[in-house]
Amino acid sequence: MLLGTQRVNEAGHLEIGGCDTIDLAKKFGTPLYVVDEAHIRQNCRNFIAAFEKRYPKNTICFAGKSFLTSAMCRIIDEEGLNLDVASLGELYVAINAGFPHERINLHGNNKSRAELTMAIENKIGHIVIDNFFEIELLGTILAELNETVSVMVRSTPGVDPHTHKFISTGQADTKFGFNIKDGSALKAVELLLANPAIHFDGIHCHVGSQLLDTESHEGAVDAMVGLLVDIKNKTGVICNVLNIGGGLGVRYRSEHQPPTYEEFAETIISRLKGKLEAAGLECPVLQQEPGRSIVGEAGTTLYSVGVVKRVPVKEEPGYRDYVVIDGGLSDNPRPQLYDAVYEIVVANKAAEPHDITITVAGKHCETDVLIWDVKSTTVVPDDVIAVQTTGAYNYVMASNYNKFLRPAVVLVNDGVADLIVERETFDDLVKNDRIPERLRKH
């Protein structure tokens, strides 16, 4: 499975963005996150185009939680997408990168005073309100600052997204947002409308991640249009914005076949228009928050192979070939968190048939298996393995477990490789450490 600008070059190596991955590994070291700029930009354009021609009143917001760096902020800005952030740190990165403040949405189920204050003072586009405590806190801060703000109300549509329980967010039993069925969402809207410093702009939901069909989004559209009707009937307010979140899946393995952007847009817009027309409602601005579907397949992680060992097992064929790489849990915790799966290319042998089965293991002090039973060619020490579709939730979840250094991130395009995040150093590991005087050697 080759993705984006990937190809096998004349040397038989995997190439991304016109750059030989073996050259990248030699120059920047491994583990290494490689990001295909052209692939990201094309995904942005295709997603926008698919909805623009069916429903011109739409805004696409990139979900920064999936992959956020200063360079990514610049790409998203240039492609005309808005940005949603979910923490003080993400908001700071966006502001520091010069992303237009009015095109930022702030999420979070437990926003701090500092987060709300930074959002208000920088006049961001929307704060997505998540709970009743936040409404009270926001009102207090606005009074102290003598400011105003635009908000949306995050609502839980009660939809089961049929994905891993750790990335399900739209069901009734969730920490996120206001329940629609028990009246909490409508009550939240009424409280916000009562504060003249708050401009209530619309409603928001998110049902889950890595969704490989449109069923959950269709259910969410139904529930959210119903809420639009309730708001109009009870308050007289017509919402300007309807945000249905993100969640569209990507190809982690060849058998994964999520809807194309065109298929997704056709289904969602047809459903939305039908429900709005039946309800007698004007068309609101449709906001969406794709993250994984924009950047997931545009990311590849390169690893160097160390130990290769065969161990006996009871199942056929009676053994397992473990290929141990120089990373793992610290640069990609997703397999341990929610059983994520991947495919690989042996980057220096990309032209060879990948017709044997190996297990790719990390080098951390845990089970730390990155990929069980994946197709490969024969692997020996010092080969370079490229793990596909690691653009989303890999770099942003990386840690220093076992005091590993977080990898570098390289942006490739037209044969040029730009370092956009430097590899951590050993000095970085200890720069915030402090030794109490009583423990110092004298």
Image (tube, grey):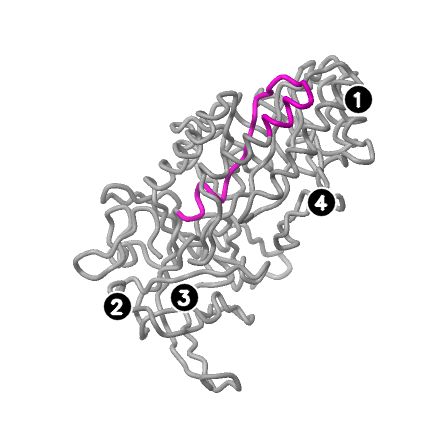
Which mark identifies residue 326? 3
Residue that carries the numbered disc 1 in the rendered image:
191
Crowding at dot 1, Cα within 10 Å, few <14 / some 14-19 / many 20+, comes out as some
Task: Give the alpha-carbon distance from disc 3 to disc 4, as whole Å.
Answer: 39 Å
Tell me the amino acid under the disc marked 4.
Gln
Depth order, front residue of 230/4: 230
Q: Give the mark, 2 or 1, whose residue is nearer the N terminus.
A: 1
x%, y% of residue 309?
Answer: 41, 81
- Part of the protein shown in magenta: 272-297
Location of residue 142 with respect to 383 vertically, above or below? above
Marks 2 and 4, the one that precedes in the sequence: 4
Label 4: which secondary element: loop
> Which residue bears the numbered disc 2?
352
Crowd rating for badge 4 (residues with CA inside 10 Å; few <14, some 14–19, many 20+): some
> In the rendered structure, which disc, 2 or 3, sits on the residue that comes first in sequence?
3
Report the residue at 71% width, 19% height from top: 142
- Point out the frontmost of discs 2 and 3: 2
